[in-house]
Image (cartoon, grey):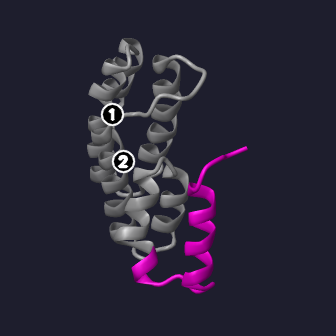
Amino acid sequence: MPRGFEPCLLAVLRLSLGADPDTRVSTGWFRESLARTGHLARAAELAYSTGDEVKRSEELLALLKERVARGCRAGRGRGVASAGAEDLCGAQELAESIPVRQLRDQALVALVPAWARAGEYERAVAVAESIR
């Protein structure tokens, strides 16, 4: 169960924005805020709400690069490596879901050093080999 102010703040923001998401919600500060606070899946949902495939791919790539650049946050009560690996699994799934091939490959390239920093060298090699 999530604790703290973040779930409450997200609920207030959602209610204040209304039910009809527009470009202010799907891009910009709200999406970036979600990604920065560790809600990558919710930020990706907003990016998927954009209609244009290229724009959607660019937003997903930006989310992934921002998340990888900030580093993976360690989970409470778990080791840093396991928390980082779990977060990177989600980031890799996000990268593989990017529809535009060139941008998907860029996302996977960004993940290779992140996997290596997490100590997952075999996974880093596998991701590097999967890039076309």
Magenta residues span: 1-25
Residue 130 located left or right of residue 14: left
Check whether the beta carbons of the residues at disc 1 and disc 2 lie within 8 A of each other: yes
Q: Residue under circle 2?
A: 64
Which residue is at a point 40% across and 15% down the rendered structure image? 120
Which residue is at a point 36% across and 47% down the rendered structure image? 64
Place of residue 129 in the rendered image (x, y in percent of width and height, measured from the top left): 32, 24
Which residue is at a point 39% across and 66% down the rendered structure image? 56
Displayed quadrant of residue 68: top left
Q: Quadrant of the N terminus?
A: top right
Question: Between marks 1 and 2, how big is the CA–CA gap?
Answer: 9 Å
Residue 98 visible in this rendered orientation of the protein: yes
Specify few, some or many for label 1: CA neighbours under 10 Å numbering under 14, 14-19, or 20 or more: many
| SS type, badge 2 | helix
Q: What amino acid is labelled 1 in the image?
A: Leu
Q: Residue under circle 1?
A: 111
Residue 8 is covered by the magenta coloring = yes
